[in-house]
Amino acid sequence: MRVLLVALALAFAIPAPGQGPPTQREIEESLTCQCGCGLTVHACNHIQCGSGEPIKKEIGERLGRGESKEQILAAFTEKFGEKILSSPTMQGFNQLAWIMPFAVVLLAGTILAVVIRRRSHATATVLTPAAAGPTPASDALRARLARELDDLERES
């Protein structure tokens, strides 16, 4: 119990991300390098990248002037377009990029549940008549089985 209380106290004592001034790395991770590597500006592994290095320098200058993360990202978006953002904004057509994965998983789960339910009902329907009692065909088969077993016993 004491450990839980200490953990809760530490959780509330640590500031949440986004509070306080933004860090250079935080902004670099929010921007995609324009050299074509597909990585963030921070993660770009090209030595002396012609795109990443100037962006890093500009981020440092803007942070030095006291600009907020939102202002810096807005400036880069204005300069390069939305393609520079490492994650799509939650506006307009980009909402589909956020909503579609969840919608597809929900739809697939619903279809799977319906298919499983239908198959389980079909299996129950197929098994129910046989469990209800013997049919004339099964009586004939049982009589034939009994005759053949009798014949087999007489031969041995």
Image: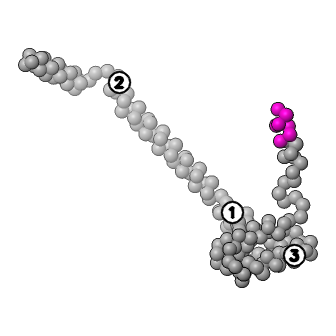
Q: Position of residue 64 (x, y in %)?
A: 91, 74
Residue at point 82%, 78% (across, down): 57
| Rendered image coloring scheme | one colour
The label shown at residue 131 is 2
From the viewer's perspective, is the residue at label 3 or at label 2 nearer? 3
Q: What kind of element bears circle 2? A: helix
Residue kind at label 2, given as amino acid type: Ala
What residue is rendered at 47% in x and 41% in y?
A: 116
Marks 3/1: CA–CA distance: 29 Å
Give the residue at x 84% y 46%.
11
Residue beneath label 1, please? 95
- Secondary structure state at the residue bearing disc 3: helix
* Residue most extreme to the front: 47
Residue 125 lies in quadrant:
top left
Q: Earlier in the sequence, mark 3 or mark 1?
A: 3
Q: Quadrant of the C terminus?
A: top left
Tell me if residue 23 can be seen: yes
Residue at label 3? 62
Q: Earlier in the sequence, mark 2 or mark 1?
A: 1
Overall secondary structure of the magenta stretch?
helix
Residue 97 location (% of width, % of height): 65, 63
In the image, taking residue 99 as reference, residue 2 lies left or right, namely right
Residue bounds of the magenta highlight: 1-7
Mark closer to the chain start, 3 or 2? 3
Measured in 3D between alpha carbons, the distance from the residue under mark 3 to the one under mark 2, in whole angstroms, is: 79 Å
* Disc 1, SS: helix
Q: Is residue 3 magenta?
A: yes
